[in-house]
Image: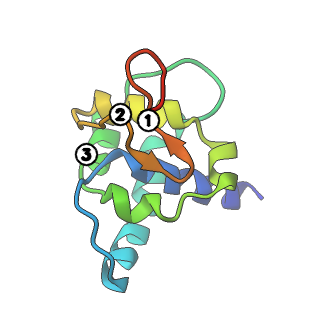
Amino acid sequence: MVVVGVRCLSFAVLLMAGILALGNSGVRAQCEASIPSLIAECQQYVSKTGPNIPPSAGCCSVVKDVDIPCVCKMVTKEVEQLVSMEKVVFVARSCGLKIDKGFKCGSYTVPDAHGRNA
């Protein structure tokens, strides 16, 4: 059960990088190959409990190499029950990524600065 939760957590963490969506199976496999590094480096920063914690340099390094749209297609409601999508955006932005309001990952839509969805 814990392994499944960690795997789902890693899918949501993948939200934090990349801009271009590539739809072939090779790209999907590349997204999935990033999961172990994301689990190792970033899971503690996106858990539902606790405050926002700035991510480590190691987490940011992994985050910057991931393709967001590729992975966002794999984010399910189950993933969203395990991971704070707000923290995912916080971590991505803390790592220097631009996450625009209105960006959608799974069913989560990034709100504007006032908390309103685009």
Question: Which residue bears the numbered disc 2?
Answer: 101
Q: Position of residue 92 (x, y in %)?
A: 34, 36
Which secondary structure lies at badge 2? Answer: loop
Indicate the amino acid at tag 2: Lys
On screen, residue 27 above or below 107? below
Q: Are discs 1 and 3 less than 8 Å apart at CB?
A: no
**Picture coordinates of residue 35 (x, y %)?**
45, 61
Residue located 51% across and 57% down the image:
11
Marks 3 and 2 sit apart, C-alpha to C-alpha, by 23 Å
Q: Residues within 10 Å of mark 2 (few under 14, many from 20)?
A: some
Residue behind mark 3: 61
Label 1 sits on residue: 110
- From mark 1 to mark 3, how far is it between C-alphas? 22 Å
Name the outermost residue toward the front.
118
**Residue 40 in sight here:** no
Give the mark toward the camera: 3 or 2.
2
Q: Distance between the Cα atoms at labels 1 and 2?
A: 5 Å
Residue 94: x and y in percent read 30, 27
The quarter of the rendered structure image containing the C terminus is: top left
Is 46 above or below relative to 4? above
Mark 3: secondary structure: helix
The residue mark sitting in front, 1 or 3, is 1
Q: Are marks 1 and 2 in contact (CB under 8 Å)?
A: yes
Q: Residues within 10 Å of mark 3 (few under 14, many from 20)?
A: some
